[in-house]
Amino acid sequence: MSETLVVVGNGMAAARLVDELTKSARGRYAGAVRGDEARRAYNRVLLSSVLAGETASHDIELKPAAWWRDHGVTLKFGCVATEIDVGRRELKIANEESIAFSRLVLATGSTPLRLNVPGADLAGVHTFRDSRDVDLLLTLAVRKKRVVVVGGGLLGLEAAYGLAKAGAPVTLVHLMDRLMERQLDAPAAELLKSLVERKGIEILLNANTARLHGETRVEGVELTDGRRIDAAAVIFAAGIRPNVTLAKDAGIPVNRGIIVDDYLQTGAPDIFALGECAEHRGICYGLVEPAYEQARILARHLAGGAASYGGSVVATNLKVSGVSVFSAGDFMGADGTETIVLNDARHGTYKKLVISDGRLTGAVLVGDVGDALWYLELIRSRQPIARIRNRMMFGRSLTLPSEAA
Ligand SMILES: Cc1cc2nc3c(=O)[nH]c(=O)nc-3n(C[C@H](O)[C@H](O)[C@H](O)COP(=O)(O)OP(=O)(O)OC[C@H]3O[C@@H](n4cnc5c(N)ncnc54)[C@H](O)[C@@H]3O)c2cc1C
């Protein structure tokens, strides 16, 4: 008889794990997935495109109902897992019976943070995480009143771009002195800022939100330097917090995320975690690639194969507010590293390669990201680059013409 594998969360990591399991452990598990959102798993990354009107919401679904059915997985959405009984191996679902499991996987993702400032709970203050948020942001945009987005990371920029494209005047306020400071160095961030501003989005840097004004509805944002921006709505895009409560309440060790070892196993037997809710060697990843890598490894492990996870080399390879951006590895260039830079602001292109001990260790690209995956492969493989060093800035086809031909 097959064992019962229960997955909590019906997001990107969960869907990929089940997909991998159908290949590597076919027939071994009877799968049950429970997710609290009101729809089947979808590509969350594409919510930005839905907001920008470039993709229809129904087109971002990852697997149709028939796929789950045909693979013998009972998927129920719109239901919240409320408690894990580790000893009895049972998962409790709100308003439903408990489900017995032989193995349990937590794939509960993250929750957006709301800044702890006066006015943060006023009506008209929102976040950007799921399909419902997008529906709400689209209704805001059609009112054509100013929206302030707090946070100049990926999500803030995506929210600002989508809202602006949908017709709202947008001001983006960011605490730091440059956009996407965790992915970009100063010249790349400066170029991104000018390209985003060309799309009509106002950007304020070194802008620390002090409070939100309004009686019951938000009317404006006040910064600590006294500046005030009128706003009919405010979107917080200032970070995420892994969803750990379910694990923590069950006595499973958590830190910022649910602590997992190299087999994605939590501190409880036969209970695993992956994706944004998991913390591996002190790192909670906030991107989809590491979640997919973890799904691959965990599926192999659950299938009885030998596989362990050593962490991910994180790369950012995205279109931010319509601008292509890539960064990976030590993109800042630590002491003792060499850098090669090409900066063509007029054509909206910036490239920086970081070299250490004769190997490529980091890269930043803005505008032209055609060679991003090649650079990423060089960083990941740690292969010596002395032979190609002088040409590699100009891309793969000019560096390795015989391979490109
Ligand atoms: C707008 C947007 C744009 C993004 N763009 C990019 C990008 O360009 N590149 C990139 O790499 N990453 C991007 N990300 C991040 C990426 O979407 C996440 O890293 C990825 O979705 C993580 O997958 P996950 O399964 O861990 O979490 P999620 O996809 O969030 O899935 C977790 C699911 O579990 C559910 N859940 C939580 N608790 C419970 C419970 N108790 N019971 C039942 N269900 C529960 C949640 O509601 C959610 O549906 C973006 C995110 C957003 C919001």
Image (cartoon, grey):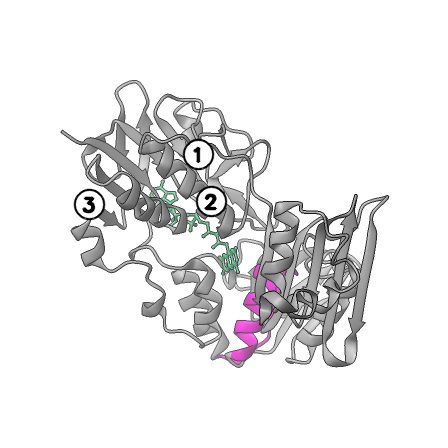
Number of the front mark, 1 or 2: 2
The part of the chain drawn in magenta is 143-165
Check contact, mark 3 vs mark 2: CB within 8 A: no
Q: Which residue is mark 3?
A: 74
Comparing 208 with 90, the one in front is: 90
Q: Is residue 33 above or below residue 267?
A: below
Residue 144 falls inside the magenta stretch: yes
- Residue 236: give x, y in percent of width and height: 57, 58
Could you tell me which residue is drawn at 45 percent across and 41 percent down?
294
Q: Residue furthest top?
A: 87
Spatial CA span between label 1 and label 3: 24 Å
Spatial CA span between label 3 and label 2: 24 Å
Check contact, mark 1 vs mark 2: CB within 8 A: no
* Lateral position of residue 253 relative to residue 39, left or right: right
- Residue 107: give x, y in percent of width and height: 39, 41
Could you tell me which residue is drawn at 60 percent across and 57 percent down?
316
Number of the front mark, 3 or 2: 2
Dot 1 falls on a residue whose secondary structure is helix
Q: Which residue is mark 2?
A: 293
Residue 241 falls inside the magenta stretch: no
Report whether the residue tagged 2 is closer than 8 Å to ligand 1. no
Q: Amino acid at mark 3?
A: Thr
Image mark for residue 245: 1
Quadrant of image for the N terminus: top left
Could you tell me which residue is drawn at 33 percent across and 55 percent down?
41
Q: Is residue 263 above or below residue 185?
A: above
* Lateral position of residue 2 relative to residue 290, left or right: left
* Lateral position of residue 279 relative to residue 47, left or right: right
Comparing 255 with 351, the one in front is: 351
Spatial CA span between label 1 and label 2: 24 Å
